[in-house]
Image (cartoon, grey):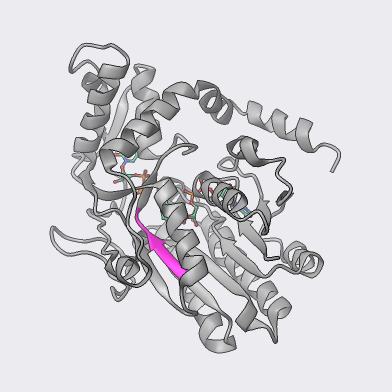
Amino acid sequence: MQKIIITGGAGFIGSHVVRRFVKTYPNYNIINLDKLTYAGNLENLRDIENEPNYRFIKGDIVDLEFINSLFDNEKPDAVIHLAAESHVDRSISSPLEFVMTNVVGTVNLLNAARQSWKGRYDQTRFYHVSTDEVYGTLGEDGMFTEETAYDPHSPYSASKASSDHFVRAYQDTYGMDAVISNCSNNYGSFHFPEKLIPLAIHNIKQNKPVPVYGKGENIRDWLWVEDHARAIDVIFHNAKAGQTYNIGGHNEWKNIDLINLLCTILDKKLGREVGESARLITYVTDRAGHDLRYAIDATKLKNELGWVPSITFEEGLEKTVDWYLANEEWLTNVTSGSYQQYYKGQYNNR
Ligand code: NAD
Ligand code: TYD
């Protein structure tokens, strides 16, 4: 039986990864380790919380003593590491939190894993989930490959780049089995409404202004979150030690075109006049150091491990909008803080 610690499993992508592993591998023992910051929400996992192969442990990866004792007690065979501070705008206002969680937290996990796995690196794996933002920004042409030099610009991407380097250093220095994947922007269900797509859906629905940074000309390459979770599954099980894979959807959108598409979809779904939602678009001051364009070349993952996205952007966006319209309560809870009461009620006695 494989025992896997998935960090950040109560977050957006982590909850999809936890769900996928719990459902697909009933003989694995899945531990979700999460601090439950504002971005972590156990409601994301209600449907699987009672599965016999799943457990939640509340904890902070920055807390070295806690992490060491967790490894001593649980003796995991693998870590899939997603816990992070993940929002670029927050990293601009509070960079140090990003250094603590994304860099120090990752090194704490690597240290604990190194000690716990000494002598059995060939039977263990440290999987680090990272972002394409470590590569910096592209001009009008080209794509990020696994060979692109790191060139991060925001405190968020600098902290993720640093953690990637530490993971490689532990592989090269101590011989640990480590793999890294760098993915483009994700979208889908359970996405905290501070990121562009859920924020826009939420605001359009509520007839509030939809803030577009600068001229809306920045380009992102969007991937459906469940396709990311499937890529992580494929890489975790099949990649050779020390490998890095880029994950992306070949799906580039200018922010303003994406927002206009969402407005059109929501006009239809909410029975509004054509063009009504687009009137909510409001141009605001640009983000400092705003990367112009991200685009992923995922050829290596396709050729070596056979992964390609399973659905088109149109299908994924439609599913996503439907999910947000049907899950108003989730949105209200994550934004109002009543989730905290749920957590206390659920875990008071632990
Ligand atoms: P998220 O912000 O939704 O979730 C992060 C999770 O980590 C939350 O549950 C939070 O409670 C937990 N966490 C934060 N600090 C912690 C700490 N100190 N100890 C324990 N848990 C802690 O993030 P996400 O969008 O799901 O991203 C997950 C990972 O994927 C991150 O590493 C991110 O860099 C990476 N990534 C994200 C995207 C994207 O588009 N969202 C794209 C590529 C890579
Ligand atoms: P975001 O979802 O924060 O992801 P990232 O910065 O990691 O790519 O932002 C996606 C794009 O949308 C990015 O170019 C910034 C832009 N943006 C807006 O125009 N308005 C907003 O309110 C937000 C949150 C983002």
Left or right relative to 113: residue 317: left
Location of residue 73 in the rendering, given as x and y in whole percent from the top left corner: 81, 65
Q: Nearer the viewer, residue 29 or 202?
A: 29
Quadrant placement of the C terminus: top right
Location of residue 168 in the rendering, given as x and y in whole percent from the top left corner: 49, 78
Residue 285 shows in the view? no
Q: Main secondary structure of the magenta part?
A: strand
Q: Residue at x 22, y 53 (%)?
A: 292
Q: Residue at x 47, y 78 (%)?
A: 240
Give the farthest residue toward the right. 349
Location of residue 7 in the rendering, given as x and y in whole percent from the top left corner: 61, 57
Left or right relative to 30: residue 150: left
Q: Is residue 244 magenta?
A: no
Quadrant placement of the N terminus: bottom right
> Is the residue 220 above or below the residue 134 in the image?
above
> Is the residue 185 above or below the residue 260 in the image?
below
Q: Quadrant of ligand 2?
A: top left
Left or right relative to 320: residue 29: right
Residue 267 shows in the view? yes
Q: Residue at x 59, y 52 (%)?
A: 8
> Is the residue 346 above or below the residue 149 in the image?
above
Report the magenta residues as a range.
180-184
Specify the quadrant of the image occupied by residue 141.
bottom left
Q: Nearer the viewer, residue 91 or 233?
A: 233
Q: Residue at x 22, y 45 (%)?
A: 253
Location of residue 286 in the rendering, given as x and y in whole percent from the top left corner: 27, 42
Specify the quadrant of the image occupied by residue 121.
bottom right
Q: Is residue 182 magenta?
A: yes
Q: Nearer the viewer, residue 237 or 191?
A: 237
